[in-house]
Each structure stands twice: as structure tokens, then as C-alpha cells.
Amino acid sequence: MRFYNILFSLLLLCFCACNSEPKPDNLIDEDRFVPLLVEIHLADGYLNTKSQMPDSLAYRGNGLYTAIFQRHHVDSVQFKKSYQYYAVHLEQLGKIYKAVLVQLTAKNDSITKLLAAEEMRKSRRNADSVKKAFKIDSLKQAAKRDSIQKANLKTNAAKPIANHK
């Protein structure tokens, strides 16, 4: 009896491993699936940064995903079936996600460069404003010194006249 159980288990495992699931009729090809997944993952990241209120998350998420599917001329059922097909065919899914990772990394690098450039502009602006403030302050101090010196000259000039009387 034990032999039959092992044989049955092996045959069942063989049938499961030889899953020859046919391609769905409306399978999204890999070239169209990569940009779709990139946008889906960006939307997921955006939604994860927002407040986690269940109603608002579902409201924002549904609208966002619907807009992405419309932009790529795909519906959610077609996306699910395609994703399930690629999940069974891991080699194809691996290639797809390598391309997704390349695109997301490129987007991240470009955003990082933009943020670094903006930070550089801000620091230059701050440095320039500090220089301007220092110039203005030094001009005010110079003007103050000049007015003090003029006042001292007037009082010094007035003293000898007062002493002569």
C-alpha cells in the first residue's frame, strides 16, 4: 500500500509540474507589460506614502489604477490573467521584472539628479543672500561710522568755538 501512495504522489507531482497552461486569449505581451508594471509599482509607492485610511486608499487606488489601465488600453481582468500567466512562467516573469527594475532605477536616478540640482541652486541662493546681507550690513555699518565721525567732527569743531567765548 505504501508503494501505491508514493507512486500516486509522484504521478500527481509530475502532472502538476507539467502544467501546460495555454496562453490566455488577451495576454499582454512582455513589451507592453513592462511599462504597465512600472506605472503600477509607482502608483503603489505613491499610495503607500499617503494616509492609510481604508476608504480614501481604496478611492485613490481605484481611480489611479483605472487611469493607468486606460492609458495602456488594458482592463483589470486582462492584467490579472496576464500576471497569473507570467507568474506560472517564471523565466518570462524574471525577464520582465529585470526590465522593470532597470526602468525604475533610471527614473530614481533622474529624480535624484533633479533633487541634487535643486538643492545646489538653493544653497547657491542662500550663499548669495548671505553675501548680500553681509554687504548691506557692512554698508549700514560704514554709513553709521561715517555719521558718527561727522557728528564727532561737528562736536569737535564746535568745542573750540565754545572754548573761545
Image (tube, rainbow, N blue to C red):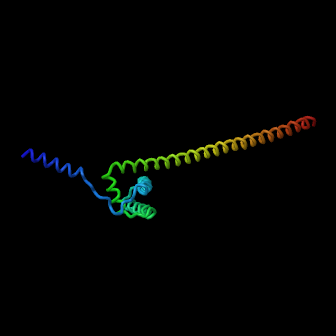
Residue at image coords 36%, 50%:
92
- Give the camera-side residue of 1 and 35: 1
Check the image and report above or below for 72 versus 153.
below
Q: Position of residue 4 (x, y in %)?
A: 9, 47
* Quadrant placement of the C terminus: top right
* Left or right side of 89 for 34: right
Residue at image coords 33%, 49%:
90
Q: Residue furthest left?
A: 1
Residue 47 at least partly seen: no
Asked where in the image residue 163 lies, by quadrant, the reply is top right
- Give the camera-side residue of 112 and 99: 99
Check the image and report above or below for 136 versus 28.
above
Q: Position of residue 70 (x, y in %)?
A: 44, 64
Q: Position of residue 57 (x, y in %)?
A: 39, 59
- Give the camera-side residue of 160 and 15: 15
Check the image and report above or below for 64 versus 9.
below
Label tally: 0
Q: Residue furthest right?
A: 164
Residue at image coords 72%, 42%:
135
* Left or right side of 127 for 23: left
Residue 137 at least partly seen: yes
* Left or right side of 130 for 3: left
Q: Position of residue 119 (x, y in %)?
A: 58, 45
